[in-house]
């Protein structure tokens, strides 16, 4: 994100209108374009003797589809417009830089442990994840931008965007009712940290993330949590220290070797009998849905979505010393898992296990 002032400023009304346009296009993409692509694909496949069994075979069916190209173009460019367009998140926050940077000097800084010397993993700094210019770590305003961007990540939820984090926190509470210590890996700007804090008011909660700007924003919104700039794959916590280790939407942003290191780290810091619960995107059994998911990862600068979905997590977790392993679909909103649900959605999944 540049520190050079933009030549044109915008008022709040114009910014809100621009972002509302993005949300409207996203709804059209989810509710109209996706079912249309699916219907076109189904018609083509109905005439085929050998049905596609893999995502690459699905891609062959759709490679000449103008509708699919239209669908793909919209997905790529509405995200680009959301961040970097004339009424995008980057120019809007840039023109408020001085005011926003002042807010980061608030007393909550005492609950934030920044580590300017922390070496960013190559996979993390070499890709502008989600098409966020400069990534979510390289600029002091990145946490504010990411927080605002996330509000339109699930447009079908509307004003209930936070509901899925509450739903997930409820699952965590039911899995481990009375923990003394909880570790949240990859907490970002605290989207799940708050609901976790609400579920466990008496617990000691630690939250770590590679992004210093994100944990600063998280600390402004979530009380009674210590936020630390730290690599979740290499923490400095003692062995068998936590009753619960959790994360939301972290694993799919790591290459498989780092996923394995992170899960091994969770095993190390968990007490025997401790619970690990992750919310993430995993595996669609349907090859068409899997193709759309994998191609979304490419269009949205999330290169590790596909590798995670192809991992054998149950075998890996068994090898790392976990038992009672569960990999189950997660209903992010009411009715999302119903057979008649026609709009596009991520393969939300809860991955949980117990430290042996």
Image (cartoon, rainbow, N blue to C red):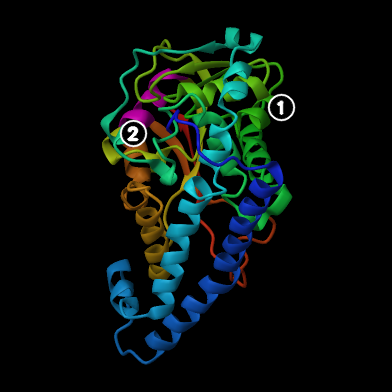
Was residue 261 drawn as part of the magenta stretch in this picture?
yes
Was residue 130 drawn as part of the magenta stretch in this picture?
no
Assign the magenta stretch its main secondary structure.
helix
Residue 326 x %, y %: 48, 44
- Seen from the viewer's position, the closer of residues 38 and 277 is 38
Question: Which mark is on residue 198?
Answer: 1
The quarter of the rendered structure image containing the N terminus is top left
Residue 168 appears left or right of 321? right
Local crowd size for mark 1, using a 10 Å CA cut-off: few (<14), some (14–19), many (≥20)? some
The residue shown at (62%, 22%) is 99
Range covered by the magenta-colored residues: 259-270
Q: Is residue 331 visible?
A: no
Residue 38 x %, y %: 48, 77
Task: Tell me the quarter of the picture where residue 321 sits.
Answer: top left
Label 1: state its secondary structure: helix
Residue 23 appears left or right of 278? right
Q: Is residue 6 above or below residue 99?
A: below
Task: Tell me the quarter of the picture where residue 289 sits.
Answer: bottom left
């Amino acid at each position: 994100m540049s520190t050079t002032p933009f030549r044109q400023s915008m008022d709040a009304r114009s910014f809100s209108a621009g972002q509302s346009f993005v949300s409207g296009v996203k709804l059209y993409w989810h509710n109209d374009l996706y079912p249309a692509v699916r219907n076109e694909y189904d018609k083509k496949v109905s005439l085929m003797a050998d049905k596609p069994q893999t995502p690459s075979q699905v891609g062959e069916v759709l490679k000449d589809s103008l509708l699919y190209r239209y669908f793909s173009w919209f997905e790529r460019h509405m995200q680009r417009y959301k961040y970097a367009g004339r009424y995008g998140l980057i120019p809007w926050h840039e023109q408020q830089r001085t005011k926003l940077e002042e807010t980061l000097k608030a007393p909550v800084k005492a609950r934030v442990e920044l580590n300017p010397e922390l070496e960013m993993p190559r996979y993390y700094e070499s890709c502008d994840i989600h098409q966020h210019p400069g990534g979510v770590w390289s600029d002091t305003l990145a946490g504010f931008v990411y927080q605002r961007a996330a509000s339109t990540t699930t447009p079908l939820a509307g004003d209930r965007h936070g509901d899925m984090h509450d739903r997930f926190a409820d699952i965590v509470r039911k899995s481990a009712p009375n923990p003394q210590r909880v570790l949240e890996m990859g907490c970002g700007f605290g989207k799940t940290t708050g609901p976790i804090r609400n579920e466990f008011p008496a617990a000691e909660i630690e939250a770590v993330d590679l992004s210093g700007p994100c944990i600063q924003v998280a600390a402004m919104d979530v009380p009674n949590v210590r936020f630390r700039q730290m690599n979740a794959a290499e923490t400095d916590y003692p062995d068998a220290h936590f009753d619960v280790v959790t994360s939301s939407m972290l694993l799919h942003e790591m290459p498989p070797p780092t996923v394995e290191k992170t899960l091994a780290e969770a095993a190390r810091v968990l007490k025997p009998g401790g619970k690990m619960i992750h919310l993430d995107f995993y595996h669609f059994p349907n090859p068409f849905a899997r193709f759309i998911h994998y191609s979304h990862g490419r269009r949205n600068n999330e290169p590790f979505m596909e590798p995670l979905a192809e991992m054998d997590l149950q075998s890996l977790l068994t090898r790392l010393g976990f038992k009672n392993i569960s990999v189950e679909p997660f209903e992010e909103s009411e009715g999302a898992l119903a057979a008649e649900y026609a709009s596009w959605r991520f393969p939300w999944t809860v991955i949980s296990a117990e430290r042996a």
